[in-house]
Amino acid sequence: MPAQVTERQYQGKVHEDSRRLMSAWMGELGRAEAEGRPTGAIMISGNCVELLRACHILPMFPEVTALQNAIRHKSLPLILKAEQAGYSSDNCAYVKADIGLFLEGGMGPGKPMPFPNLIVCNYVGCNVYVKWFEHLADISGAKLFMLDVPFLRAAEPSPADIQYVVGQLRELIALCEGVTGEKFDIDELREIIGYSIRAEEGYSRCKHLCKHKPAPFDSYFDSINLMGPINVLRGTKEVADFFDVAVAEFEGLVAQGLGPLSEERFRTVVEGPPPYPYYKNFRNLFAKWGAVAVQSTYSTVGGIWEWGFRHDPARPLESIAEQMLRENLTNRSITTRYQQIRRYVEEWDADALVIHSIKSCRLFSAGQGDMRDYFTRELGVSTLLVESDLEDPRYYAEAQLKNRIDAFFEALEHKKVVVRAAGRRGAGAPPAEASR
Amino acid sequence: MTPEQILDQCRELVARPLGAVAERWKAAHPGGRAVAAYPVWAPAELIHAAGMLPLSLLGGGTSVELTHADARFQSFVCSIAKSTLELGFQDIVKGIDGFVFSNICDVARNLSSIYHRNFPDVFVEYLHLPQNSTSPGVAGYAASELRRLTQGFEGAFGLKVTEPALAKSIETYNALRARVRALYAFRIAEPQRLSTTDLYVTLRAATLAPPEDAIGWLDDLLAGLRLRDARPRDRLRVVVEGAFCEQPPLGLLEVLEEAGCYVVEDDLMLGWRWFTADVAGDGDPFERLGAAYVNQAVPSSVRHEGREHRSTGLIEKVRRANAQAVVFMPAKFCEPALFDYVLMKQGLERAGIPHMIVEFEEKMWTFERTRNEIETFVESMLFD
């Protein structure tokens, strides 16, 4: 029996700084109404947060509100409230938790979460975004701007795609000017993009550090500390500095040969969002096997930075459009995601793929059985597929998950033993049977 | 032909496997190609203008057992996505050369690329249809997307779509849609002469034949229906809403009427009667079709319309059809329909229009509970 794997409580400065930055932003949102500061709702995936920032509109992210309520075990009453109002049990629970927050009195004028002054639906692949923001506009009465980003149908967006998005970004700027009464300054946007580039560079560097053995952090469970700053607060000096600190800290761990667990036995790539209502429980199911995620697709929802794309201050609107069109997971096809995962498995030297299939987000999950088929049958990558939800705790069945995860890693361990034995035989050692 | 003969012919066509429909047409058109379009809207005009046969791709209905696709798509995914993939695995669409999908929902999006991965030898294209309905560049962008599709046809089949050919196809489909609008108007006026199952089968058959042929039989049907003898009954006039993609089984539509409803409006096969009026004008036909998509589309759960509330189009439909109630009929797991249900029902309640909801799956085969629910709803309305 292998020795017990323990979790090293290493989170330290990255975790603390991330929490401090996100709390400060939430505090700003809470005060925005009283201070007369305009707010704009926007989605995480492939967002144009730099533009809102340059227009002096404080961004708010309903997805972040929903996930925070889930991780604090507050989502179920909100979901039930929305279902009482007519939402189906088969609708995305992120949306229901957000609408439920309004119905419960947690969102609106004078409430902890203000209504946005402007709703910018960055339609980046996810059709539920369209519905979500239509409903948010309906309850809040705020102006809805539908920023239609064409889905990536080839390796590169066409010039027509880029031109179409840039045209809409210009319209959005004019709309923001109307909301704030302030003139947009392109040089301010360039400065903001400069901070974005520093953060993108840092995020990318952190993810590449996970190629080391052991990986200095879990690129699925710990990435949440990096995802908040990169997706929500990108374009600020504080977040550019945060990533400098994060890189230094993770480089330090690499130098010391330290990872998040006492031992890294299995390196995994994880596909799909986590079950926020049972985040820690779910993590423990993998930690006990010494399984560390060295890459994850969820961490690229907002942007894929590890392959070199950066915003460009010389082409500010065009590069924002390119990021929305191409450089994020959600605006790419699921089979393009197969190639992203394949690259992760190969370049990050992973032992297995774990697919966490969630009911709420069909964009992520619809067809993941085909993904499993591709990785197991065509590539021979050990693949585990488990199901629950990112927001609705009713879909999290821990005993069932534990059985499947335990069985998977037992089999994976056995496979490793067999491979090692074959390696020894190949190196001249006698076969196991003969050496008895 | 009498209406009954036409309807028999339509039923026979609808019952035929999709691949067989294509093969029969190709036998009469050597070298011809057939391209099928997944719901909701696809530019059939472009397929037609390339000299190919446009077909509707509406899943497996009640006729296909899932043996492969349910291992690819999870239990919480709608039936039409799974059965459409299954059609490929079981060779039921053999003979169809291409498939067109679009951004109607997240499942359709993934289905498109998964279909392509599993069947790399057929042409598969995914269209991005604009969700922004008001920006100045939208219509032009829609036109460019249509041009991109024709480039795909040219690359895959060597078939060009010329502007004159497209202009002619637009005219042909304008004529077809005018007949369909006339049939819908006829049903509003005299629902006792045209049942919803008959109308539905006719419309569905029209999407499985060259439009020129369909126009002929729709004319005959319309003329014959006017002579049909039928006595009006004391029924509830309802609008059916939510079945724009996955199609309900015929049995469910029959139950709806048997339980005391006249369906006077619906959104079945919505994409094939997408435009509120003819695609008009002269000039570049790609631009005209793109502009029509943006400015002349019927209200739909799969297209964002920034100029009006979600419930507005439905309420107008109720008023126009002189309906008394709405029966929401979303397919199980259909997110666009299920989300819109909330805003639509709130709008109906503000307008004082009664409603009920009946979820379905294409393979649904027992309807007694649904019949009971509908009967109760109808009685509560008629004897109130």
Image (cartoon, coloured by chain):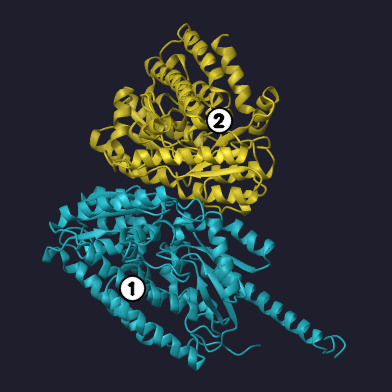
State the CA–CA distance, disc 1 to disc 2: 50 Å
Location of residue A3 by image quarter: bottom right
- Left or right position of A249 against B312: right
Is residue B22 shown to the viewer in this render? Answer: yes
Q: Residue at x 27, y 49 (%)?
A: A145
Task: Name the quarter where the C terminus of chain A is drawn.
Answer: bottom right
Q: Circles 1 and 2: CB distance less than 8 Å? A: no
Residue to which mark 1 is pinned: A229
Residue B108 left/right relative to B328: right
Q: Which chain is yellow?
A: B
Front in this rendered view, residue A149 or B192: A149
Q: Name, please, the residue furthest toward the right.
A: A434
Quadrant containing the N terminus of chain A in the rendered view? bottom right
- Kindly state the secondary structure of the residue where label 2 is placed: loop
Q: Which mark is residue B50?
A: 2
Q: Is residue B302 left or right of residue B96?
A: left
**Viewer-side residue, A176 vs B9:** A176
Q: Chain of mark 2?
A: B
In the depicted structure, whether residue A408 falls above or below residue A424: above
The amino acid type of the residue labelled 2 equals: Ala
